Amino acid sequence: AAYDIDRFYRCDLLILDDLGTEMQSPIINTALYTLINTRLMRGKKMIINTNLSEKTELPRRYSPQIVSRLRGEFLSLFFFGEDIRIKKNMW
């Protein structure tokens, strides 16, 4: 199991999809902080996407340390439009 977890730290590019949908617990928040911080310290690339708003929802859900890293170390790109899953069901 330790080898599997180490792969998240070592891979060249890590994509965290839909940040904010994971269960909340102190253990999960600690693991997320450690993952983000370790990868930043090692200069490893990450892509993180979320539906959480940067100003209100991220700070409510995550510690100041995680939010600081997300705001300070990542380029934020904002996408707006209709939900394609809802749009598909209309047809």
Image: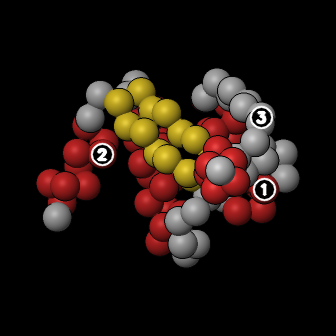
| Secondary element type, mark 3 | loop
The spot of residue 31 in percent (x, y) is: 44, 60
Q: Which of 85 and 27 is in front in this view?
A: 85
- Amino acid on which the number 1 mark rests in the picture: Glu
For disc 2, the marked residue is: 8
Q: Distance between the residues labelled 1 and 2?
A: 25 Å
- The answer to whether residue 26 is seen in the rendering is no
Q: Identify the residue at image location x=23%, y=45%.
A: 7
Residue 47 sits above or below residue 63 on the image: above
* Element carrying mark 2: helix
Q: How is the rendered protein coloured? A: secondary structure
Give x and y (percent) for residue 85. Answer: 62, 51
Q: Residue at x 69, y 27 (%)?
A: 77
* Residues at marks 2 and 3, CA–CA distance in whole angstroms: 30 Å
Find residue 4 and report its horizontal and vertical position in percent.
19, 55
* Mark 1 or mark 3, earlier in chain: 1
Which numbered tag is attached to residue 57?
1
Residue 2 lies in what quarter of the image? bottom left
Looking at the rendered structure, the secondary structure element under dot 1 is helix
Question: Is residue 70 in view?
Answer: yes
Of pointers 2 and 3, the one earlier in the residue sequence: 2
Q: Which of marks 1 and 2 is nearer the N terminus?
A: 2
Q: Could you tell me the amino acid type at mark 2?
A: Phe
The numbered disc on residue 34 is none
Q: Of tags 2 and 3, which is closer to the observer?
A: 3
Going 17% across and 64% down the picture, which residue do you hit?
Answer: 1
Q: Which amino acid does label 3 sit on?
A: Phe
Q: Do the residues labelled 1 and 2 touch (CB within 8 Å)?
A: no
Mark 3: few/some/many CA within 10 Å (<14, 14-19, 20+):
few
Label 3: which residue? Answer: 80
Residue drawn at 48 percent across, 55 percent down: 32
